[in-house]
Image: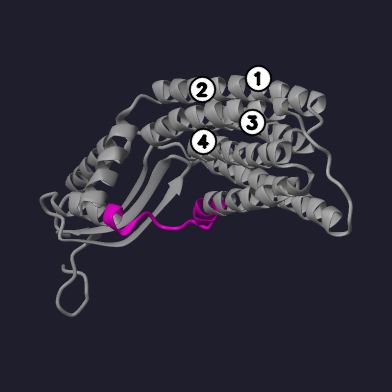
Amino acid sequence: MTTKINYLCNALYVNQMEQKERTRIIYKATWIGSVVNLLLVLLKFAAGIIGHSAAMIADAVHSLSDFITDIVVLVFVHISNKPQDKDHDYGHGKYETLATAIIGIILLIVGLGICWNGVLAIHTVWIGGQLASPSILAFWAAIISIVFKELIYQYTIYVGRKVQSQPVIANAWHHRSDAFSSIGTAFGVGGAVWLGESWRVLDPIAAIIVSLFIIKVAIELLQPCIDDLTEKSLPDEVEQHISLVAEKTPGVSEVHNMRTRRIGSHFAIEMHIRMDGHLSLYEAHRKASSIEKELKEIYGKETHVGIHVEPKKNANGCYEE
């Protein structure tokens, strides 16, 4: 029950936040992350080339994909905040879902790529080949990456949860996946440097282990996108709360045929309510508008609310006259 209450309180806080302020916070977090990513990309490529480390160069490519996803978030969050227009009656919120899906797909591709490269490297050792020996420079570059990527993950995940933004949360996990990648790189490079030639295979082994974490995160990010794109309903506790809001309105006898879904960071709510059939059209409209107003106060002014009013039914299932 505590989790359900916290979910509703978070939704209340987030949706009451001014949209411009929400966008500003998202942009700030993403710009900070992109600057850190760009600096790490330059550092890792330099360390990989100078330090003769194929693992560090692969890690740099991973960071480059992270930088690209920052740009994706900036572009799609801007689009998703556009108001509804003639071609988008429900607004542009689904662009946030699309951005999250793109990030998840990029993560999946990167994870599979790292795994495949690790398998090829292990195969090279298996058939008697030798792996290149990296220098200590690559090891320290990996350590720096781990520290900064974990810090930027903690900051970004905090912001993403605060404003309930799927792309920002997805991007935070991409930051952490980059940190995981650097851990594998540091482990492999450190083993190759200090344990000798026969231990250089630790690099690709660690890379494969890290790639499995990355693939797992990618799948976890893609699942909510699939739910949104297939119009999955809101959680049961949210729907129950919506029903309570409608049913406590004087004159409402029943709520049924409720349909809910997410449109980006916003909710879409449609329902049928039954009231006394002898009410005037004006009075029925007033009560329905009251419910709509309260739901928007709770879940945000961008919430789509559609209410169909019906007269009450008698014991025989017929409308009362």
Q: CA distance from mark 4 to mark 3?
A: 19 Å
Mark 1 or mark 2, earlier in chain: 2
Magenta portion: prevailing SS class = helix
Picture disc at residue 27: 2
Q: Check disc 3 and report the residue beneath it.
A: 142
Q: Check disc 4 and report the residue beneath it.
A: 172
Left or right of 113 on screen, residue 90: left
Q: CA distance from mark 4 to mark 1?
A: 17 Å
Please rate how many residues cluster around mark 4, counting C-alpha atoms within 10 Å: few if below 14, some from 14 to 19, many from 20: many
Disc 1 to disc 3: CB gap under 8 Å: no
Q: CA distance from mark 2 to mark 3?
A: 27 Å
User: Where does the image place residue 49, in percent across and percent down from the top left?
Assistant: 81, 26
Is the N terminus in the top left, top right, bottom left or bottom right quadrant? bottom left
Q: CA distance from mark 2 to mark 4?
A: 13 Å
Mark 4 or mark 1, earlier in chain: 1
As drawn, the residue found furthest toward the bottom would be: 316
Left or right of 21 on screen, residue 230: right
- The amino acid type, in three-letter code, at marker 3 is Ala
- The amino acid type, in three-letter code, at marker 2 is Tyr
Residue that appears at 69% across and 35% down: 65
Q: CA distance from mark 1 to mark 3?
A: 13 Å
The part of the image, by quadrant, that contains residue 100 is: top right
Residues in magenta, as a range: 222-238
